[in-house]
Image: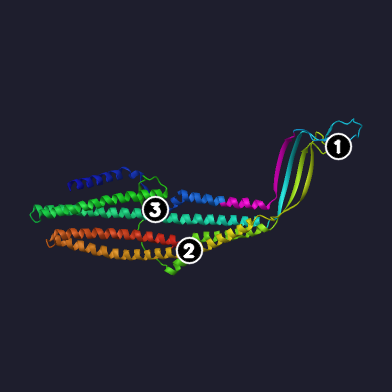
Amino acid sequence: MNGIMALAAALLILAANAGSAIAADTLAISLEESVRIALERNKDLIVAREKTSEARALVGETETAFLPQITGSAGYTRLDVAPFIPTSRFGMLGGGLLPKEIVIGLRDNYAATLRLQQPLFTGGRITKTRDIARLAGNEAESDVQRAARELVYEVKRAYLSCVKAANTERVAAESVNRFEAHLADIQTLRDAGLAADNDVLKTKVYLSESRLALMRALHAVRLARTYFCNVVDLPLASEILFTSSIEAAAPIGIDLETAVGTGLRKREELQSMEYRNRMTRKEFEMARGGYLPDVSFFANLNYLYPNREYERDFYSSWSMGVLAQMNLFDWGRTAYRIRQSRSRLRQIETAERSLRDAITLDVTETYFSLIEAWNEIEAARENVAQAEENHRVTAARFKEGLATNTEMLDAQVLLTGARTIRESAAADYLIARADLARAVGADIP
């Protein structure tokens, strides 16, 4: 037992020395500041924002399809032999004076072409592609908002958990101080012959247990602080001073029906699902457009070598026209695409109904959890008041010799437990409020 007490005392001394050594490097931070830092530094949120930028760039890319496209090409071709006409096909014409072949071209050929093409009709494919890109951009923005909302909740939960752990540590330290003071009193009484040795031993056991509880509280503080630093993207070894209080807790001003309705309107997941639904409908329309022709205007400017008279010189030419292309037979590929789009649309509609049910359940659960947390606060406050009064009366009776050592120890244990529950209830209530705000997708009154 003495070894445990010595270990606990050594741990407390080391913690105190470490705290004084790094006090100058401690970061004082509020809940609002924590949220701001996390929104700026969170890597997943940065990736989500980049996906939004990517989606916007895709919209710009699709809009270029409405404009005329200008392409250029250049090439060089060397033939094994220059084009020629054999004179044998002329029979005896020329009296045998003609050569065996008449060269009509060159082995070296050059060609450069500048082509302009403007779509005239595509069955709505270009327009729907642009619309799909815009909807994808809207979905990406909804994903950013959802990720930010989830991050805000995680930061608040981590911050409040740290404050809760720190308050629990404070209550545990106060308990240790009370047991140490009581041990000194009971030892004085024992020396005066007014208490038994067993009372001293029993008090030491309670003191040892309170020190172990303080050790666990210290570990909980470190773990909570490390998790908080990870969420906010701070160095994990940072020493943090949490400046926001958890005392100002007030009941919510929203009923369950309003909370559910707000969640079904505000949750970004439903907005993303709506955008996905509309995109799939556009894809379905595009698939049906595969039965329609594509019509475009084209104009070509050519620069060729050799010239039309097969001389060693360049010449230019131009051409223009209207090109129509239509799928006449593709083994049912267009029909299969239509079936795929129709199936995806049904999947999304089913998933949307399921998501609405899930959001309703999520809001309902968090709402009742918040109500329960508020009731626990009320009960904890009353419990602390009763425990404090019980401790005061028992201490007074103990000094007068009317209460036993066991009663005094039990009163201290009850007081420590009541205060610990009160601190936990206050933090849990604020965490539950943050969770309900996450569930409804908006701040709650």
First of labels 1, 2 by sequence position:
1
Residue at the spot 22% in from the left edge and 45% down from the top edge: 7
Residue denoted by label 2? 354
Q: Disc 1 to disc 2, how far (Cα)?
A: 82 Å
Residue 89, which numbered label? 1
Query: Are the residues flagged by discs 1 and 3 in contact, CB closer than 8 Å?
Result: no
Q: Quadrant of residue 331?
A: bottom right
* In-front residue for pair 371/159: 371
Amino acid at pointer 1: Arg
Judged from the image, the secondary structure of the residue bearing numbered disc 2 is: helix
Closer mark to the observer between disc 1 and disc 3: 1
Q: Residues within 10 Å of mark 1 (few under 14, many from 20)?
A: few
* In-front residue for pair 439/228: 439
Closer mark to the observer between disc 3 and disc 2: 2
Amino acid at pointer 3: Ser
Q: Disc 3 to disc 2, how far (Cα)?
A: 38 Å
What's the image's color scheme?
rainbow
Residue at the spot 72% in from the left edge and 47% down from the top edge: 116
Residue denoted by label 3? 30
Judged from the image, the secondary structure of the residue bearing numbered disc 3 is: loop
Q: Is residue 81 above or below residue 225?
A: above
Amino acid at pointer 2: Ser
- Whether residue 90 is visible, yes or no, is yes
Question: In the shown orientation, is residue 67 left or right of residue 442?
Answer: right
> Percent x, y for residue 127?
65, 57
- Is 279 contained in the magenta span? no
Question: In the shown orientation, is residue 134 left or right of residue 35?
Answer: right
First of labels 3, 2 by sequence position:
3
> Percent x, y for residue 378?
31, 65
* In-front residue for pair 394/61: 61
Residue at the spot 33% in from the left edge and 55% down from the top edge: 164
Q: Which segment is the magenta one?
A: 55-79
